[in-house]
């Protein structure tokens, strides 16, 4: 089915001017951009976005990292977009990411892992609504 998913290009990747290279991978894999904006997350936004991880030992560092520079939040659309995006990203820890994936090729560490992608269609809807109004999604 045609789905939408939320993707975030993280501060380690914007700092290294990797936005274009990462976006090309999404488009080459058949995912289309229906929304995209470059923003700086506030601490409150980052804490709320990652609130499922609030009890994890890395939460404070994760939030600090996500507000350390600009991010690009984007909505990708395509066939099985949630799973497709996760394939292209590779495993969370770049040490475990398959060759040719974004994280294998670009990520610096499990924290500075270049991209975020929604983990389910249900969470994608929540995450998309967190950053975009319906009128900003242009299919
Ligand atoms: P993301 O898909 O954005 O969701 C939560 C993030 O926490 C994850 O990617 C990682 O970048 C980050 N993170 C930092 N440290 C860890 C860790 N030890 N284990 C898992 N995720 C971590």
Image (cartoon, rainbow, N blue to C red):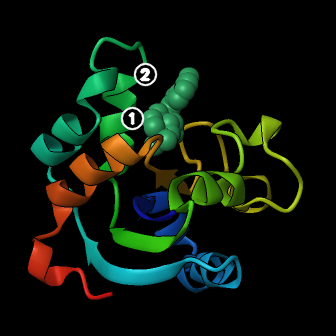
- In the image shown, does 5 or 8 lie closer to the viewer? 5
Q: Please state if 102 lies on the left or on the right of 31 as rendered.
A: right
Q: Which residue is mark 1?
A: 62
The quadrant where residue 3 appears: bottom left
The residue carrying pointer 2 sits among few (fewer than 14), some (14 to 19) or many (20 or more) residues within 10 Å by Cα, namely: few
Q: State the image coordinates of residue 101 (x, y, percent, origin top left).
A: 77, 59
The residue at 33%/87% (across/down) is: 139
Q: Secondary structure at mark 1?
A: helix
Residue 38, percent from left and from top: 29, 77
Q: Residue at x 57, y 60 (%)?
A: 80
The vertical placement of 91 against 20, above or below, is above
Residue 8 to residue 43: above or below? below
- 95 over 12 or under it: above or below: above
Q: Secondary structure beneath disc 2?
A: loop
How many residues crowd mark 1 within 10 Å: few (<14), some (14–19), many (20+)?
many
Single out the residue that lies furthest toward the right. Answer: 99
Is ligand 1 less than 8 Å from the beta carbon at label 1? yes
The x and y percentages for residue 88 are 69, 60
Q: CA distance from mark 2 to mark 1?
A: 6 Å
Which label sits on residue 91?
none
For image coordinates 57% across by 73% down, the residue present is: 16
Looking at mark 2, is its residue's CB closer than 8 Å to ligand 1? yes
Residue sitting at x 17%, y 58%:
129
Give coordinates of residue 65: x percent, y percent. Answer: 39, 44
Q: Quadrant of residue 7?
A: bottom left
CB atoms of marks 2 and 1 within 8 Å: yes
Can you say whether 104 is above or below 22 in the image?
above
Which disc number belongs to residue 58?
Answer: 2
When asked about the image quadrant of residue 100, the answer is bottom right
């Amino acid at each position: 089915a045609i789905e939408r998913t939320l993707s975030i290009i993280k501060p380690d990747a914007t700092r290294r001017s990797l936005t274009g290279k990462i976006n090309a991978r999404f488009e080459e894999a058949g995912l289309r951009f229906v929304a995209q904006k470059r923003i700086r997350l506030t601490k409150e936004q980052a804490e709320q976005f990652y609130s499922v991880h609030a009890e994890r030992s890395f939460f404070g560092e994760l939030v600090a990292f996500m507000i350390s520079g600009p991010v690009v939040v984007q909505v990708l659309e395509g066939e099985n977009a949630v799973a497709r995006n996760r394939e292209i990203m590779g495993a969370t820890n770049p040490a475990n990411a398959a060759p040719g994936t974004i994280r294998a090729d670009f990520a610096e560490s499990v924290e500075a892992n270049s991209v975020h992608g929604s983990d389910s269609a249900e969470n994608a809807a929540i995450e998309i609504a967190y950053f975009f109004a319906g009128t900003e999604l242009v299919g």
